[in-house]
Image (cartoon, rainbow, N blue to C red):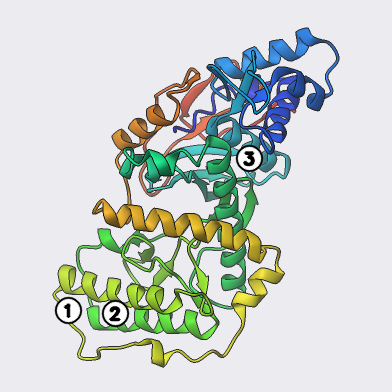
Amino acid sequence: MKLDTRAIRYLTGEDWRVLTAVEMGSKNHEVVPTPLISQISGLRGASGVNRSISNLAKVGLIAKVKNAKCVLRPIDDGYRLTYGGLDYLALNAFIKRKSVYSIGNQVGVGKESDIYVVADESGKQIILKIHRLGRISFRTVKANRDYLRNRNSASWMYMSRLAAMKEFAFMKILKDNGFPVPTPLDQARHCVLMELIDSYPLRQVTSIADPPKLYADLMALILRFASQGLIHGDFNEFNILVNEETQQPVVIDFPQMVSIDHTNAKEYFDRDVQCIKTFFERKFKFISDDEGPTWDDVKRTGKLDIEVEASGFSKKQAKELDKYLQQITQLDEREGGEAGDISPDEDDEDEIEQSSDVEEDDDEEEAEGEKSGGEHSNLSKDNPEMKNEAKTPQALSSGV
């Protein structure tokens, strides 16, 4: 799924109300009937609703479902929200809060997330992370129809929301307590805004001046997390950033973080430790004389896991997301998958697979950028030109 923001400045107030209505209807309906969309939107006259539905469908923000059925009867005219529509709703929220002013280039494609550089009103570049849970399941287990049958686009989007909520909550707690993580700035739906870190993923670092020191720092960080009641759960070379000059590590990606009271806490802790050991041996030919740390070394001195729950991310939400992430981890391991990035081609293939039952028109253009973020997209409603890439960052407006 590509983030194509070219249409955002053309949406009318009525279009936004209809798009929001489809989102609200999706909470209880896999396919939202047109009469329900009209009712929720509160717009008078069917012609206005139908016009907005047509506008939204043309740019791929909603999709008309073929042969739609509900429990009681077939639905002649039903729509579902697409990830593109959810993207627009999240961006609109950021625009209203003045968190985002312009959109830059895509700088990363993860297993279940897309990373973009954006800018705020002051021109400061920040990171936009868009969670897209569900993508890896189609990439690794297309043949597992029993698993896929229990999921639809609405549930993937719900899980993506939970992932974003959890990541923002954990980042905020960790940052407030002095952990080396990006500063979280804002969160809306399935998207998180965070500080842009001037570092590279550890997997991309070709040489380290002092491998033993970095190794020791990372192992100490695993123990420090655990001492505060937390286990990262995916602590590897893909989720550790290293500054080229200082070689100080910064940890990212927190949707899979769990409490040390979790049923599988020891397993996750041991896996995090082993990931670092394996990577340093393979990449830097370094093997530590110290076999630790081990689970017995964990001594709780804080309760950040409890503080996160108090911040608004409930146990129920944590269990829902954890169940999904465990399933995906098992499925990925079964297929021999490895954590990290996927190629744009795989991303396109996933999108085709997921949209096979709907009628929608998706644009396949994508803007790739380097660490600096490159050029920014011009989405201003008062500018007569509309391009994916603008030579200078310019205002972003949703027209509402």
Q: Along the polypeptide, which appears first: circle 2 or circle 1?
A: 2
Position above or below: 385 against 89: above
Q: From mark 2 to mark 1, how far is it between C-alphas?
A: 9 Å
The single residue placed furthest to the top in the displayed view is: 47
Residue 387 placement (x, y as % from top left):
49, 22
Residue 366 visible in the snapshot: no
Q: Which mark is residue 286?
A: 1
Q: Amino acid at mark 3?
A: Ala
Q: Are marks 2 and 1 in contact (CB under 8 Å)?
A: yes
Relative to the observer, which residue lies in front, 108 or 157? Answer: 157
- Which residue sits at x=63%, y=18%? 74
Q: Amino acid at mark 2?
A: Tyr
Position above or below: 242 against 391: below
Instruction: Determine whether the residue tagged by mark 3 lies in a helix, strand or loop.
Output: helix
* Label 2, residues with CA under 10 Å away: few <14, some 14-19, many ≥20: some
Instruction: Determine whether the residue tagged by mark 2 lies in a helix, strand or loop.
Output: helix
Q: Is residue 140 left or right of residue 255?
A: left
Q: Along the polypeptide, which appears first: circle 2 or circle 3?
A: 3
**Would you name the residue on which mark 2 appears?**
215
Q: From mark 3 to mark 1, how far is it between C-alphas?
A: 44 Å
Q: Quadrant of the C terminus?
A: top right
Q: Amino acid at mark 1?
A: Phe
Relative to the observer, which residue lies in front, 49 or 356? Answer: 356
Instruction: Determine whether the residue tagged by mark 1 lies in a helix, strand or loop.
Output: loop
- Which residue sits at x=17%, y=82%? 287
Q: Is residue 143 left or right of residue 61?
A: left
Residue 205 placement (x, y as % from top left):
25, 62
- Which residue sits at x=38%, y=69%? 235
Q: Which mark is residue 90?
A: 3
